[in-house]
Amino acid sequence: MLFYALGISPSIGEKHHPMYTHIITRTARIASIIEKRRPLADKIAGTQDNLKSLASALDKLEAHRKRLLTEVEPDIKERLKTIDFSTLQFSITTELEVLDKLRGRFSRDTLNIGVVGRMRQGKSTLLQSLSGLDNYVIPAHSGGACTAVRSTICPRFNTETEAKVTFHSEDSLFKEVILPYYTELRLTPIPASFSDFVNSPLPDKPSSATNEAMYQRLKHDYYSNQAIYRDLLGASQLTVPRHEIQDYVTHANGADSFKSLAVREVEIYCPFPNPEVGQIALVDIPGLGDLKVGDEKLMLETLGQGVDVVLFVRRPDPQGDDWQLEDTALYDKAAEALNDLSRRSFFVLNQLSDTQNESKKACERFKQHLHSRQLGIKVVDCIIADCKDPQQANRILDRVLDHLEKEILDLDTKYAESCQERLVQVHSAIQVELDKAHNAFAQEIQSDDWLPLFLHLFNQLVEEISVSLTRKLGEFKKKFEQKDDEFEKQVEAVIQACNNDPGIPSIEDIEGQAALLDGYQPAYFYYLPKIRTHLQSHFSPLDAALKRSIEDQKAEIANILIEQGRLGGLTEARGSEFLKVIAGILPEQLMPEQPSKLRAAFQNISNFSHLSEVAVLESIQKELDLLRADSSNFTWTGENQAQDVQNFLNSLYKKAVHDCENALQPLLDAPNKTAFAMLRQFVDQVLRAKGIEDEWRVFLAKIRMKVWNEFAQQYKRQQWRQEWLEGALYPAMSANQPQNLQFIS
Amino acid sequence: MRTIKVTMLGPTGVGKTSLLAAIYEQYQSVINGTELQIIPDHGSEARLIKRLNELKNLETAKFETSGWCRPSTEHQSYSFELCQRGARAFVELQFQDFPGEWINNADKKVKVEGFLRESDAVIIAIDTTALIEQKKGDNLHQQINGVEDLTRLFARVYRNLSSPKLVILAPVRCESYYKAEKYDPNLLASVEHGYASLLQHLEAKGLIDKVSVVVTPVQTVGSGVVFNRIDYDENGKPEFIFNKTGAKYNPKDSEQPLRYILRFVLSREVNGRWGVFNWLWTSLGKDKEFKNALDKFTSLCKIDDGFKVIQGHRLLDI
């Protein structure tokens, strides 16, 4: 290789040369630095996770806080209002970004040297000199296409030069490249996606936008050549041999070069002329002032994560050139992204070889001016060198690597420490807010404060239940012997149904049956039980009606307990189901070693089905008995026996219906009788039983918060407090442990 | 010849005429074999025979019926002469049969009251079905038998009685409550319960010694019909529905009211407490055979198994 040919590289035989030893040591130490960074990168990753958990816990807490603000009482609300998580959330976001950079930097396999320079300052020339790559890969000729993508050049020996090409996805290209053009050029309408971009006509350049070149670039490169590069979007990483690299890094030589539009990043591996550079990489950072949108962002990102030291390349023009505003601006931008830039950067003044030494003079002038510090640009060193000269270029590299090797650990530590320090501050600030959050709810009311109020309310409640139940009992008693209108209607309907549907066989049927059974008398006896069963079936709705009426009456009693008794809050069940649920809620014992009488009372009323004497079918058994074979004493006419059978059946059926109707009359008051009996038993059991008031007292004390608003509010506060503390605050507090945010001690 | 007046009271259609017809029929089949003869006058006989035929014709009636005779709407008077066979009559029995609603009619009430006052005996025909059967648990007794009206009637008429009276409570159409040769005990109990207000009035201090009260159930047609049910017709009027059992016309116990009336009359004469009818005793004394016949007839008054002398036993002593 050229480098070797120049005899710069130390030969095998010079292993013990002092400089060589120095270089070996340096290489080893760089390796050791990289090795030391790894565990830190892991720790940072852990801290990042913790910080994210903390952020999400705070998000939840904040959401909970906002919800509570709409619900709670004014005193709590005021305290909640003083809590501010928003600035803390912002700090966390910021620190997460910093940690990202830091982790990116610490997890790299190489120490990276960024080379920054505007067009035609010698940046590419310097990279060529250091890497041994030529114009095809790193275009440096004047008027040539500029570097189109971010490329990293790493030394790798004993293999052919090759490059790993990473492509954009449609989405990343659209977001990172296309959209910034639209924003910068103020083009509308803004497409929604990459395919929207390529499938819609490109908007005309608005007159307000001045950057014609930028517009042309969007139009002629990205818009017009989409057919060439689109297929590559989303393609997996590609390894390409040396002679193809240029297709992916520049786009000046024919249609194929538009492939580079799809490329996001290129890593080039090549044997450096200096074989002892160690684990380093050169990062080609596009300078400001190029006609590409998004460069600045890319530069800052690259500087933040991908670079340990920066070389600013500047070629002073011998013709009256001086430091420009752009130079300062570039430095300031870089300082934003890279901490301690003054200790991480070098200025390389590219001295062209000329006979008059004009260039050398210009460089000296620039260097002097830089050192005067009026510029505000502070660098480790300002080196004048001819970038085209590999020997001089490698001297720059040596200088930089020496510096890196000595300083980088210190710089790393300092940077990490500053970040850690801010995290400690964030932690403390969060703790302050969390403490406020912890005090937002006053302490729980002391356990015996409620008793006097409870007793007062209890006495009122018992009085109300007692009065209402007794009044209801009075109502039921008044109706005790009255017919129940609803039930009477049911009975009438049933009797009507009996009359309308007697189920008496036709003469033809009787004749058929008589023929089958060989006689009219057998036919008559055949039909009797059938008619009996038929009649009985008509009465079954009545038992259901009785049951229903009992349910209705239970509902009336339940209503008293729900309204006057305020027990509605215990369950959403209503009607008779309410009584059942309460029986279930009541504990088996309310007083020590005594089965709960209150529970038994609720179980009793809940299970109450009917009074034994009011079952319909039992009441009419005697009447149905008429329709038995042995109870008829008709005389057969002998003339028309089928008619006789029909007459007899009809007669017995009608009499049975008539008698059943009579037999049911005493049942018409059954619902009212039942209601009274049921309620009387209940009232006796829940109001008059020995020791029952104590049971009520104990039970209501247990459930007071669901019964009285006075306690309900307290209950709500407790609920709020509990949810706030356990649901939101405690997780946040445990996420905000100092050790969670510590990645260096 | 003395006249013994008997008032027939009871609701329309209950069967007062049928009761008389049955009395006449029983006379023919039971009594007339003895020395005692009961002879209706011509007019009475014709009407009673007509009614009897109606009752006997039940066999042609439908299986299910709500009644078998048309109720009388006019006041009827029936007259019977009691005599010794082949001798002249010694007493006339005069039955006044009033349509049931008369006691509620302001004009006709006076007539009823007047005759009741004059009567020695009164037969209160009771609609037994209404008394005992129920429709929807209610019974129609008050509505149909009109006990309250009756009680008021007696309260007005039975005051300062100068002569003893016989009140016969005669539940008719008792066929459905007669099983195995016995009346349902509930029948008598129902009468006493259903007529409690009247009975209470009659046992008042001023009446208890002067009024004899008896209960005599009557089966005007016999076991040929049996009660089935009560329906309401389209006007809401209760209809008592009976079924024909197939048995023939066979009235039972319908002569009992007559036996009690004669016993009552005889007792009065025998004991002479009232001194008015001494002529009877005198004439009876003349013919021992007739007296025996009369004794025998009256001694067959039933007093238990559904029959009962409620008060005034002494007035029936012979």
Image (cartoon, grey):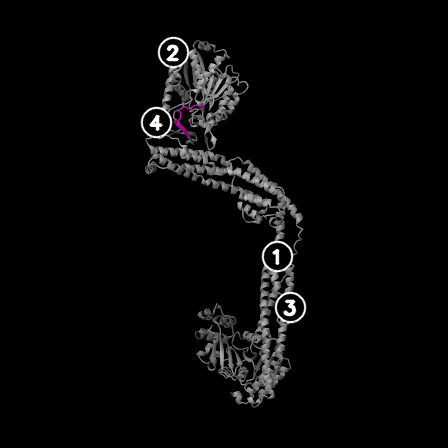
Span of residues in magenta: B217-227
Disc 1 versus disc 3: nearer the observer: 1
Is B232 above or below relative to B283? below
Disc 1 versus disc 4: nearer the observer: 4
Q: Are marks 2 and 1 in contact (CB under 8 Å)?
A: no
Q: CA distance from mark 1 to mark 3?
A: 29 Å
Q: Position of residue A311 (x, y in %)?
A: 58, 80
Chain designation of label 2: B
Chain designation of label 4: B
Mark 4 vs mark 2: same chain? yes
Q: Are marks 1 and 3 in contact (CB under 8 Å)?
A: no
Q: Which mark is residue B86?
A: 2
Q: Position of residue A290 (x, y in %)?
A: 53, 77
Q: Which mark is residue A425?
A: 3
Chain designation of label 3: A
Is B294 on the left or on the right of A401, as rendered? left
Disc 2 versus disc 1: nearer the observer: 2
Q: Amino acid at mark 3?
A: Gln
Point out the tag, 1 or 3, that comes first from the N-terminus: 3
Q: CA distance from mark 4 to mark 3?
A: 121 Å
Point out the tag, 4 or 2, that comes first from the N-terminus: 4
Q: CA distance from mark 4 to mark 2?
A: 39 Å
Q: Amino acid at mark 1?
A: Gln
Is residue A711 visible in the rendered image? The answer is: yes
Instruction: Name the residue nearer the viewer: A700 or A392.
Output: A700
Question: Which quadrant of the rendered structure holds the N terminus of chain B?
Answer: top left
